[in-house]
Amino acid sequence: MGIRGKLNIGLSLLIIVSISAFALITQMTVNDSVTSNRDDVFSQKASKLSIELRNLLRDNINAMERFFLQDDHTKHLIEDYPSWGTSEKQLVKEHFLAQLVSNVLISSITLIDPNGNPVLEQGRYKGPLSNKFKSGSKIDGEDKCPCEPQIMSDLDYVYLLYPFGSKHTVFVRGVLVYQIRISTLAESLSHNHEMADHAFYITSNKVPIYEYKSSQDKSFANFTTGIFVNSLKENIQHYMLPPKMEIDDYFIFSSSYEPLRWNLSYIIPSNIYHAGLVDLRNRLIIALAIIVWLAVDIIFIFSYRITKPLTHLSKITKDMIFYDYDSHLEFVNTKDEIGELYSSFEAMRQKVKLLTTTDALTGVLNRRFFMINLEKEYERLKRSGGDLCCLMLDIDNFKKVNDTWGHQCGDAVLIRLGSLMMGIGRTYDILARYGGEEFIIALPHTSLEDARIFAERLRKSVEGHTIVFDNTKLSVTISMGISCFSNLASDTPDLLIKRADSALYTAKRTGKNKVVIYEKDLEPA
């Protein structure tokens, strides 16, 4: 559908909605039957409380899973808690703290072993005691992963338990526990449901664990928790309350949340309950008037839907200036002129990405994009700690290859070497052609010894590989220099490369086809 068609639809909807709104108001004036649905209105409000509670807890369980599975490093770090040192424990604490900052519902986060013993706690309040969920949890070290998360509660807290295993065992390795204050959870529910004129109770097995009363209405002066509890004990045999019940001059609309055996109840004074019969019609008329007013804005909304893709496209273009070619395109699948524009733009963006980030001959990253990625890794290293090594390599006697078999053969050697290194490296290693026959590799999360092992494996693979060009078989060797960040306060990415280059120079000068690790003594006088 074209842009003109969208504008025509907008004008048509404006006329249709306006006529329908006025017709409906006329009908409501002579027919007051809508007010008979007052019980349904309050019952739906009570049901929404349970639904929102379920959604809140489900969202937090999903957040636990996203946090645990956000990347392999975090996942493996938490799984290997028995082997933590001081730095690993501090890093996990920082991860926990970030979760607490981003989610105000959570009181604390605890990592426990399969026996219920706390391993690490981080929270705004004192973390949960192990005996609170030792008896209630059905998770132990004999269970196999994956296990379903569990929800538990006592009179003060809700506990979300997320069991996890590890790559070394199929059994439960440990459990992440999110502790949420019931009062915080209930306040979140009550604030979202405009509770100013109502009382609100959460009961567990007919025992109130949270209560809220309006401070603006004296109608609740005669309604006490004792009256509520006594009425439940006398009239209710099961823990689940009926959808509607009446206590003295109050109506109670309830819904239940089965996993915790909770009931969530509205307490509504009779004067408010009956006054709503009159107010409901007036509110609906006002709402319809608002709908008519909103109908006038429909045309502007459609105009916005037209201009929004163009604004988004402008943002994507600015992202490209900073070498971000992976921003999501929201409108590429729409079947109109905007969709065609986005499809053409995406094709252009991918071509620009190829030209600006990769080496045209070998297919690996180019030097400019390597430096951008190295700066990002350096900033990550300063924030989170860890290791980062740099490996610079050069093809031995490459000039002889060009002089003997020609530059096309030299190009074939560079292409094959680039392909070989991409096959050996990890997905998050940063491989680039530095210039001529020189390549450079940044190795995140890699110690100096692991970098040396990787370099030796690469050197041997290149040495044992045969390159065929124009019926000619030849092999080459490479020399490599390795450096690693040793002092983040003074080291820089440029210094890291300079040290790797110095080690490479030593490798070339002392016989070639070898790996040399940077040492201060290697620096030229």
Image: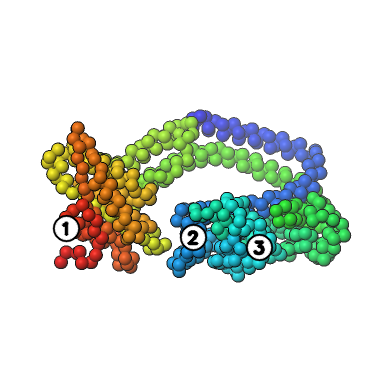
User: Dots 3 and 1: beta carbons under 8 Å?
Assistant: no
> What x and y, as percent, mark residue 513?
21, 52
Residue 103 visible? The answer is no
The residue at 68%/60% (across/down) is: 136
Residue 306 visible? The answer is yes
Assign the C terminus to one quadrant of the image.
bottom left
Q: Name the residue that disc number 2 marks.
A: 80
Q: Nearer the viewer, residue 117 or 8?
A: 117
Category of crowding for the residue at label 1, using alpha-carbon neighbours closer than 10 angstroms: few (below 14), some (14–19), many (at least 20): few
Q: Disc 3 on helix, strand or loop? A: helix
- Identify the amino acid type marked 1: Thr
Residue 520 falls in which quadrant of the image? Answer: bottom left
Q: Name the residue that disc number 1 marks.
A: 510
Q: Disc 1 on helix, strand or loop? A: loop
Residue 272 falls in which quadrant of the image? Answer: bottom right
The residue at 57%/56% (across/down) is: 172
> What x and y, as percent, mark residue 487?
32, 67
Residue 265 shown left or right of residue 74 in the figure: right
Name the image colouring: rainbow
Q: Earlier in the sequence, mark 3 or mark 2?
A: 2
The residue at 31%/55% (across/down) is: 453
> What x and y, as percent, mark residue 363?
29, 41
- Identify the amino acid type marked 3: Phe
Q: Name the residue that disc number 3 marks.
A: 133
Category of crowding for the residue at label 2, using alpha-carbon neighbours closer than 10 angstroms: few (below 14), some (14–19), many (at least 20): some
Residue 272 shown left or right of residue 178 in the figure: right
